[in-house]
Amino acid sequence: MQAYVHGYDEQENRRLQDQAGTLVDLLHSDTAYPAGSRVLEAGCGTGAQTVTLARNSPGARFVSVDVSAASLAEAKRRMDAAALANVELRQADIFALPFAPQSFDHVFVCFVLEHLPRPLEALAVLKQLLRPGGSITVIEGDHGSAYFHPDSEAARRAIQCQVELQRAAGGNALIGRQVYPLMVAAGFEGVRVSPRMVYVDSSRPERVEGFTKKTFTAMIEGVRVAAIQAGKATPEAFDEGIRALYRTAEADGVFCYTFFKGVGRR
Ligand SMILES: C[S@@+](CC[C@H](N)C(=O)[O-])C[C@H]1O[C@@H](n2cnc3c(N)ncnc32)[C@H](O)[C@@H]1O
């Protein structure tokens, strides 16, 4: 695995949790699996999405895998705290999964392809694990979809630092726009992608906190040291960009971002 651009520390864990909490309805309200079905969640991380998935489909059996043992340990704590008994957590690499072909009815992948150097190959691997007619759900963001008021060149440059660092680590922070072509190229049938736009103004204080500040700006802020060390920004320029992003969370500010949710069948 390449270096994971966001890292695995406690702050990143909280960020993923805030992200999942704010976006639950927007991203997951139309995802439910029938009782008795077997679902593979690839790249579950600390289980931020797993809790919602498993609660929304109490009769389905989830196998949630991640390459990071530390994230899985946190996911285990979370599953225990939520008293979820329908989730099995396993440490595994998407490119070397220990499962037989066609052993799942559904696959779910959220915010993972963006970190993989070979996202198309990953989709092809996951397709082999689906039974014919089984479904795959792919959710990815796209940092090119971030726009805001007041607009700020410094903020856009700080976001671009994150995009470039993720690219250097083998990922693609602009992958949301490629969900459809990637799923089609991987051979899935009936692919449909729906954009899920997060719109934030101060009349939605929970989104200001949960998304603009604690999800998006926290993520960009999280690459500060790496961006400066890589010579992509001076400390002053980067901090100006972060201040400008926080500025969009004030009473007259607006922040927009779009996620892309694709569903297809084998
Ligand atoms: C941004 S996190 C998303 C986690 C979770 N899906 C969520 O939405 O909260 C990306 C996760 O993908 C995992 N990952 C990256 N490459 C992987 C690989 N090759 N196999 C399995 N997991 C991988 C990372 O360890 C990390 O936990």
Image (cartoon, rainbow, N blue to C red):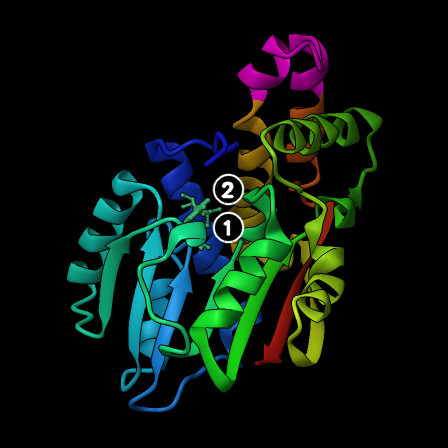
Q: Within 8 Å of ligand 1, the CB of disc 1?
A: no
| Secondary element at tag 1 | helix
Q: Nearer the viewer, residue 253 or 172?
A: 172
Task: Identify the mark at residue 190; answer none if there is no mark.
Answer: none
Q: What residue lies at 24% left-to-right and 59% top-to-bottom? A: 89
| Residue 165 image position (x, y, % from top left) | 64, 27
Type of amino acid at the residue the image marks with label 1? Gly
Task: Identify the mark at residue 210; answer none if there is no mark.
Answer: 1
Q: Is residue 149 visible?
A: yes
In magenta stretch: residue 163: no
Q: Quadrant of residue 163?
A: top right
| Secondary element at tag 2 | helix
Q: Label 2: few (<14), some or many (≥20) within 10 Å?
A: many
Q: Is residue 24 visible?
A: no
Q: What residue lies at 52% left-to-right and 47% top-to-bottom? A: 209
Q: What residue lies at 72% left-to-right and 66% top-to-bottom? A: 185
| Residue 132 image position (x, y, % from top left) | 51, 86
Q: Are marks 2 and 1 in contact (CB under 8 Å)?
A: yes
In magenta stretch: residue 230: yes
On screen, residue 245 versus residue 210, left or right, reads right
Magenta residue span: 224-240
Vertical arrangement, residue 230 with respect to residue 186, above or below? above
Q: Label 1: few (<14), some or many (≥20) within 10 Å?
A: some
Q: Nearer the viewer, residue 234 or 148?
A: 234
Q: Nearer the viewer, residue 33 or 95?
A: 95
Q: What residue lies at 51% left-to-right and 78% top-to-bottom? A: 29
Residue designated by label 2: 214
Type of amino acid at the residue the image marks with label 2? Lys
Q: Within 8 Å of ligand 1, the CB of disc 2?
A: no
Examine the residues drawn in magenta and state their main secondary structure: helix
Image quadrant in which the N terminus is located: top left
